[in-house]
Image (spheres, coloured by chain):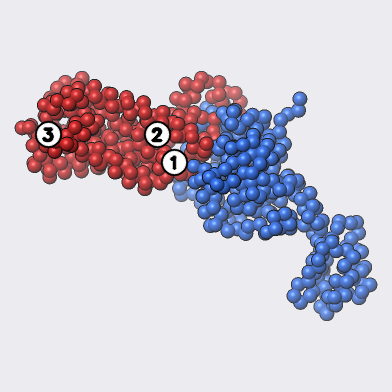
Chain colours: A red, B blue
Amino acid sequence: MTALTTADLTAADLTTGRGLGAQFASDVWVLTKRSIARIRNEPETLSDVTIQPVLFVLMFAYVFGGAIGVGGGNYREYLIGGMLGMGLAQTAPGTAVAVVSDMSTGLIDRFRSLPMSRAAVLTARTIADLLTQVIGAAVVAAVGLAIGWRIHTGPVEAIEAFALALLFGYAFTWAGVCLGMVLRSPEAAQQTGFIIFLPLTFISSAFVPTQSMPGWLQPVAEWNPMSSLAAACRQLFGNPNPAAAVHAWPAQHAELAVVCWAVAMLAVFAPLAVRLYRGKGR
Amino acid sequence: MSEPPAIEAEGLVKHFGKTRALAGLDLTVPVGTVYGLLGPNGAGKTTAVRVLATLLAPDGGQARVLGHDVVAQAATVRRTIGLTGQYAALDEYLSGRSNLVMIGQLSRLTAKAARRRADELLASFGLAEAATRAVKTYSGGMRRRLDLAASLIGNPAVLFLDEPTTGLDPSARALMWDIIRDLVAGGTTLLLTTQYLDEADQLAGRVAVIEGGKVIAEGTPAELKASVGGQRIALTLAPGADTQAAISALKPFATGPIIPNDPGLLLEVPVAVADGLATDVLRALDAMGVRVSDIAVRGASLDDVFLTLTGHKAAETNVAAQTAEEKEEEEEAA
C-alpha cells in the first residue's frame, strides 16, 4: 500500500489564497453539481415538475374546466397562469424532503467539519431546485401550448411573466429549506408540505376565480400570493384575468404584489434557514 | 516555546436535556500519536469527538486543536482536521470518485488537485475498480474505506475516527486496521474511539478509558494493564495431578485468588512481574509432586483493566443495541 497522507499538496493545489466570495461561489457550484448529478442518476425525482403538472393541467382542462366559469374567457387559457404558480411552489415540499434527508445522514456533519462556507450548502440546494423549476415552467408552458393556451402579448411580457414565476418559486424554495430544517423525517416533510401547500394552492385564483368563493373566503384568496402570481401571469400573457375586476390591492397591482411577497419571503426564510443550519449542534 | 499538543481538552461539559454526556473531560494528545478513547456505550466518546471536531459547542470547559480553540477559532480548526463518523458521510447517489472530488474541492483543493488526490486514495484503498459506481451499491466495508478516504483528501494533520470498525466483519476490520497503521506511519495524529479493547490495544499508543463523560484512567495499554495486576500465569496440569497441592504451591506467588476450572486441570494465577518467575513456579510445583503439561505467562488484557475500573465487562459486540443508543445520542444532539 502506498503512503496515504502523501505530503505532496503544494500551495498551487489549494484554493485558500482566494477571496471569500470566490470560495463561496466555488462551494455553491460544487454542491449544485452534486444535486444535478443526483437528478441525472434518478430522473424520477423530477416527477414533481414533469408528470404532476401535466396531470393537473389535463385534469383541470378536460375534467373540471368545463364546470368553471372564468367570465366568458377560455378556461384553458386561464388555467396556465395558475398552473405555473402551483407547479413551482409545490417543489418546496421536495426541497424540504431533500434537506431532511441530507440532515439525517452523516453528510451534513462532514460538510460542517470542512473549511467551507456554511451558507453554501443551503444556497446550492436552492439553486439546484431553481433549475428544476425552470424545467417545470417549460413543461407547464409546453403542455399549455398543446391544449390551446397562447401568449397574446410580446416576448418581453412573456419573459417578465416567467421571471416573476421563477422568483416566486425561488422564494418558496427557501421556505421549503426552513421546513426541512425543523422537521425530522422525509415522511414528515412530505406530509407537512402537502398540508401547507394544498390549501395555499386551492384557496387562490390558481384554478377558479375568487369571485366564485363565499364572501368570507374571498379576502383570504385575494391576498394569497398564489393569486397574485396567477393574476400577474394572466395579465402579462394576455389571458383571461377575472381578478382585474377585484378591488383588493394585490389584484390591482398583481406584479408588484408578487415581487413584494417574494422579497418578503426571501427576507424571512433565507436568514432563518441559515440560522437554523448554523444552530444545528449548538 | 514548545509546540502545542495536537488535541487539548480541559473540563469539557455537555448536556443533552437531562443527560450529562460529558462531565468534565480532560484530554491531551501529543502531535503524531494515536490516542484511543475507550469506553462502553453512552460513555460520551462520540460527544467528545463532536465537540473536538467543531460540530457541537460544549456547555463548559474548553478545547484546542493544534492550539486553536474549537469554538472561537472553529474555522481555523476545520482546516486542520478530518472526521470519520460512525455513519458513512457520503452521497449515496454519487460515485465513489465523485464523492471524493466533491469533498476535496470543499476542503479547499483545486479541482485538479482534488481529482488527483481522489485517484490516489481510491487506488490505495482498493476502491479503484468501484470508483465510478454509485456509493449505494458499496458494501459496508467499502463505504467505511471511502469515508476514511474522504476525511483524508485534504491531508488533515489531526484525524478523528469515531468507531471506525463498528459493524464490520473481521476481514473488513483487519483491512481498516492496516490502513490506520499506514496512516500513523505517515505521521498523522489520530484520535480513535472504540468499544473494542483489542482495537485500542492494536492501534493506540495511549488510551483514555472513559465512563460517565470523564476519563477514569489514562496511559499506554501496557501501563493500564500493569496497573491492574501485572501478569497472569496459565497452567495446564498433567492428568491425575493434585489440584489442591498445586494451589498451595502457587499461593506464595499469587496476587489474587487462584481459580481452577471445573476438572481442576487448568489454573489461572494473577502474579506480580518478576525475573525467572516461570522457573520458580515450576520448581515449587515439582517440589509438591505436581506435573505440568503446559505453562504460559501473559500480560493482563485490557479486558481485565476494563473489568477492574468499571466493575463491568466491556460491551460485547451488540451492534444493534449500540446503534440504537448512539442514534438517540445523535437525535438529542440535533
Q: Position of residue B203 (x, y in %)?
A: 69, 47
- Report helix, strand or loop for mark 3: helix
Question: Who comes first in sequence, dot 2 or dot 3?
Answer: 2
The chain containing the residue under callout 3 comes to A
Residue depicted at 59% across the width and 45% down the height: B21
> At label 3, which amino acid type do we have?
Gln
Q: Earlier in the sequence, mark 2 or mark 1?
A: 1
Going 76% across and 72% down the picture, which residue do you hit? B261
The amino acid sitting under disc 1 is: Asp
Residue A266 locus on image (x, y percent): 35, 27
**Res A51 → quadrant:** top left
Image spot of residue A230 (x, y percent) = 19, 30
Q: State whether discs 1 and 3 lie on one chain.
A: yes
Discs 2 and 3 lie in a common subunit: yes
Look at mark 2 in the image and give the residue it sits on. A125
What element does badge 2 sit on? Answer: helix
Tell me the CA gap for discs 2 and 3. Answer: 38 Å
- The Cα–Cα distance between marks 1 and 3, rounded to whole angstroms, is 43 Å
Q: Amino acid at mark 2?
A: Arg
Mark carried by residue A102 = 1
The residue identified by callout 3 is: A211
Check whether the beta carbons of the residues at disc 2 and disc 1 lie within 8 A of each other: yes
Furthest-bottom residue in view?
A: B240
